[in-house]
Every structure is written in C-alpha cells, then in structure tokens.
Image (cartoon, grey):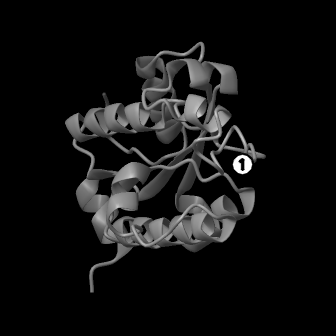
Amino acid sequence: MITQEDREKRNQHRAAVIWITGLPASGKTTTARRLEETLFRMGVQVYALDGDVLRRGLCKDLGFSETARSENIRRVGEVCKLFADAGFVVIAAFISPYERDRRQVREMIGTERFVEVFLDCPPEECARRDPKGHYRAAREGKIRGFTGVDAPYERPLAPEVRIDTQRCSVEDSVSEIIAYLHRSGFLMTKSG
C-alpha cells in the first residue's frame, strides 16, 4: 500500500488543501490560478478547483439557499480530500460564506493539511471590480441572495493567511501564500 509518507517523499511536498475564501470579486479565482501556475513551475503536484466550474458540473443540481450552499461546500470538501489523499496540493477558490461550512471542511481534510486563505477586500471595492456585474444586479433586485449584498459572508475567525487584496497585488498575494507553505513545512526542498 502506498502511504502518505511515500507520496510526500516522491513529491517533495506535503499534501494540502489551500482554501481561498472571500467575497465575490475579491480575487479568489485570479489568485488561485496564479498560485497554481507558480506551484506547478516549482514541481508541485497541484490542482485548482474553482466555484464557477464546479457549479456547472458536480454541483449543478444545487441552488443558492443556505442549505444548498452548505451542500456545495461539503461536496467540494470531499473532492479536495480525495486529491489531498493522492498527495496533491489542492487550491479551492470558493466564496464559502459560512464559518461552520469552512470548519466542517477543515475537520474533513484534517487541520494539519488545511490552509485557510482569506482574501479580505471591502464590499465596495469588490463591487467596483466586479467583472460579471452581479453586485449591481443584486442591488437592483435582479439577483436575490447574493453574498455581500443581501446574503451574509462570515469573515474567517482565524485564517492561516489573510491578504488585503485592495492593497496587495496578485503576485504579492501568491508570494505570501508560498512563504506560508514554506514556513509551515508543506514545501520541502522546492523553491520558486
């Protein structure tokens, strides 16, 4: 049987789930993609999961009620666990608005493999940079239950990494996450 230690030795990194959370348009997808590219160039077995993509496939049967959002995050957590069990560094970029859901995924994955990254950006800035126009549509009543407008977002209580994306560039955000992974022993001998 192949053990987690066998995978770590071969990969030269520990398996991890990097859970990127934040308001819509806070920079989750952009940061996740850039982080994935950087880690891949470093030789890390890495895969990024994006909320929009999974909503069109694995979770297309779910709506946006509180219960449906929780089920969406539970399913994503299960997928992340499978990847982490296979030795990957998984990057999950999801709004995941409820603290209890993020805590449930942390427990499912294991605290020692879970890295919560909070992209902290004021709602006004997220609305300003919103590429899909969802904030405006929600404020005009065309979309109901939109996180950050008329649905809650519970800020993480103690994320491993907090990044102010209003002030921090994508490159700096990625560097901060990678520095955390090095300090915490997830990345062993690889360097960027």
**Amino acid type, callout 1:** Ala
Q: Quadrant of residue 166?
A: top right
> Which residue is depicted at the point 36% across and 35% down?
35
> At 36% from the left edge and 70% from the top edge, which residue is drawn?
58
Residue 10 left/right relative to 4 = left
Label 1 belongs to which residue?
151
The residue furthest top is 167
Taking the spot 41% from the left edge, 38% from the top edge, the residue there is 29
Extreme residue in the bottom direction: 1
Viewport quadrant of the N terminus: bottom left
Dividing the image into 4 quarters, which one contains the C terminus?
A: top left
Using a 10 Å C-alpha cutoff, classify the residue at mark 1 as few (fewer than 14 neighbours), some (14 to 19) or many (20 or more). few
Q: Secondary structure at mark 1?
A: loop
Q: Position of residue 84 (x, y in %)?
A: 39, 65
**Closest to the observer, 96 or 117:** 96
Q: Is residue 176 left or right of residue 66?
A: left
Q: Residue at x 32, y 65 (%)?
A: 57
Percent coordinates x, y for residue 160 in the rendering: 64, 42
Q: Quadrant of residue 16?
A: bottom left
